[in-house]
Amino acid sequence: MTNVLHRADSRGHVEHGWLRSNHTFSFASYYDPERIHFGTLRVINDDIIAPGEGFSTHPHRNMEIISIPLEGSLHHQDSIGNDFIIKKGEVQVMSAGSGISHSEYNNSDREEVHLLQIWVLPKEHNIRPSYSQKYYKESSRRGEFQLIVSSDGRDDSVSINQNAFFSLANLEEGQNLTYRKYLKSNGVYIFIIKGEVRVNDLILSNCDGLGIDSDNNIKLKSLNDSEILVMEVPMDVEKYN
């Protein structure tokens, strides 16, 4: 089994006044040749956006972009006609495909918004751009994995243009859980949103990440109340570039 461990304090960090962001992988001004991607998982940005601020309209092509608000809400507008508010508890997926432009702003003029934005390389290039968002009950992931993103929209998940599967779990102190891969050829990247979790023989804390590319059954034990995001992705990155 091969592990790639990314401790929270080893991430790239940027501050722009209106934006505080931590980058698990190389992004914008942060570059580390050892941290370009994990398989087709290309970006995990942990963003905090000031009230009323955000990203003005900008383009994307051939990337699957998943946004998960952790606190607050985000106002999304794009070039294919979508204009929505994304709140904590919801998951947004944008398949950029042949090209899409969008903006995203903190929807509050009083409170910060905290979100994870994740990029995955697509299975097919130059598809028609698309957009989806969905609300997921927190109660449905207590003590178990809740599938939120998949290749085919199974189990009420949001579908993306890749053989990837994202799941959330909320565990109480002392709870055990085993993650079983959907596809044996995929790798699994575990991100601790909050809490402390033993994954196999490693202890992960707030915002630590662990990539595992060759273990089909991954054992987790929560050492205190924890929130976990599991991202299962294809590892043959050359196939999708």
Image (cartoon, rainbow, N blue to C red):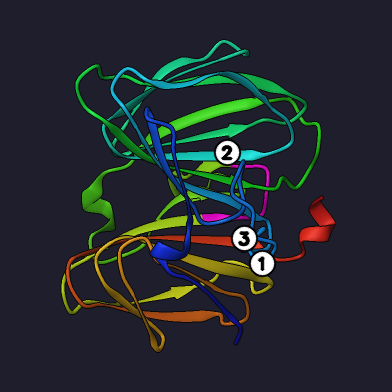
In space, the residues marked 1 and 2 are separated at their CA atoms by 22 Å
Binning the other alpha carbons within 10 Å of mark 2 as few (below 14), some (14 to 19) or many (20 upward) gives: many
Kind of residue at badge 2:
Ile
Q: Is residue 81 above or below residue 149?
A: above
Q: Indicate left or right for 240 with 176 as reference.
A: right
**What secondary structure is found at the residue carrying circle 3?**
strand
Q: Earlier in the sequence, mark 2 or mark 3?
A: 2
Residue 216 image offset from top left, x and y in percent? 56, 80
Is the Cβ of the residue at disc 2 closer than 8 Å to that at disc 3? no
What is the chief secondary structure element of the magenta stretch?
A: loop
**Disc ID at residue 233:** 3
Q: Is residue 239 left or right of residue 152?
A: right
Q: Which mark is residue 65?
A: 2
Dot 1: few (<14), some (14–19), or many (≥20) neighbours within 10 Å?
few
Q: How far is disc 2 from disc 3 in space, using C-alphas?
A: 14 Å
- Residue 208 picture quarter: bottom left
Q: Magenta region: which residues?
A: 160-165
**Which numbered marker is on residue 34?**
1
Amino acid bearing label 3: Val
Q: Image quarter for residue 54?
A: top left
- Asked if residue 194 lies left or right of residue 199, the reply is left
Viewer-side residue, 175 vs 154: 175
Q: Nearer the viewer, mark 1 or mark 3?
A: 1
Sequence-wise, the earlier of marks 1 and 3 is: 1
